[in-house]
Image (cartoon, coloured by chain):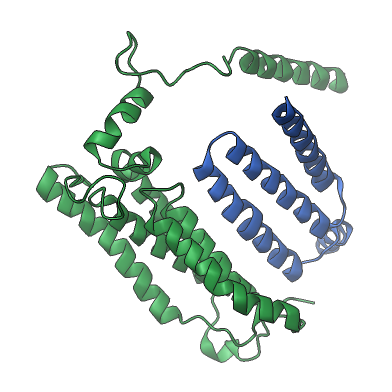
Amino acid sequence: MKKVFIIILLALIGYFLVDTVYNIPFGENRIGSIESDHPTVAGYYLSNTVEKSRVANVITAIVVNYRGLDTLGEVTVLFLATTGIASILYRRKEEEEDVERLNLPSSMLIRTGARVLFPIIALLGIYVFIHGHLTPGGGFQGGTIVATGFLLMLISYKGFNTNHNIMAWIESIAGLSFILIGVWGLISDNTFLGNIPEVGKLNSLLSGGLIPIIYIAVGFKVAVELTGILDILLKIKPNK
Amino acid sequence: MIILVVFIVMALILIAAAIYSIMHRDLLFAVMGTGIVSLILSLFFYLLQAPDVALTEAAIGIALTTIIFIITIRNTSRDEDEIIDKENEKL
């Protein structure tokens, strides 16, 4: 009886899944435009962003400008996650002495490779979040790439230590500058996180007004927070 | 035509890796399976013209999530049966 019920339930779920996917018109232009009879939000973004926000990458304009408050929320969520992990797992200086980060020392191949790759990875990450308004990517992606570079160093070198004081300062300044830029928009544009798009010319590094500055702040914040999480996680003593 | 074949092969590898990571008893291999899923998914996002999402998936899905899982496995036990045994002992 139970099995029959499960089969019926699975068949129902499968039917609705297939029905939904079957009715999606793949390959059709569903973005639309503002000139058509049924104007869409996506069409509005695509046709107005380049003129109004002066940003070449429309996705960045949506993430930082139109949906800026959501991005602030995302940054806050990441901050809270880091705070939670740090408050549960962080060890003080006295306890840290006997904590070995790795069971085995890493091989010379990994150490040499990490030393060569770390600056390149960090540079790529910084490039991604500085050029967030021109090329794909942005603060979150660039920050994560920088954090992966730090991860490589953390697992390769036992002596590689991150300074938590400096990291906390960078994080605070980045978070504060995001809010202050938002307040600046409130003063100049009457909306929180409002933009000043007239600065610079389109498709150059100095364009998009406040969007690149916000993304650089987000990039620093994400990089520092993820590096902190990884550092704390790698310092846990295995219970074996 | 050739892009369709590439898509189908990639989708098959993705599904195979997902099933592998669910079925395997050794958690380290299962984590590797999820890493392969993220890799193929990131290639899919790139081929479907979503480079932003592809970058995010590559950085977070392949590198960070996998590493955090591996750290967790290092601090607990590697084999699923061991964990179940330990839980039973506690009870």
Look at the image and tell me whether residue A237 can be seen. no
| Residue A114: x %, y % from top left | 64, 76
- Image chain in blue: B
Q: Nearer the viewer, residue B86 or A184?
A: A184
Side of B46 where B13 appears, left or right: right
Q: Residue at x 64, y 83 (%)?
A: A157
Q: Residue at x 39, y 74 (%)?
A: A168
- Number of marks in the image? 0
Q: Quadrant of the N terminus of chain A?
A: top right
Q: Is residue A149 above or below residue A144?
A: below
User: Chain A rendered in what hue?
Assistant: green
| Residue A166: x %, y % from top left | 39, 79
Q: Nearer the viewer, residue A57 or A161?
A: A57
Q: Quadrant of the C terminus of chain A?
A: bottom right
Q: Nearer the viewer, residue B90 or B72?
A: B72
Look at the image and tell me whether residue B30 can be seen. yes
| Residue A57: x %, y % from top left | 38, 42
Q: Is residue B23 above or below residue B5?
A: below
Q: Residue at x 61, y 37 (%)?
A: B47
Q: Quadrant of residue A55?
A: top left
| Residue A140: x %, y % from top left | 45, 54
Q: Residue at x 70, y 20 (%)?
A: A13
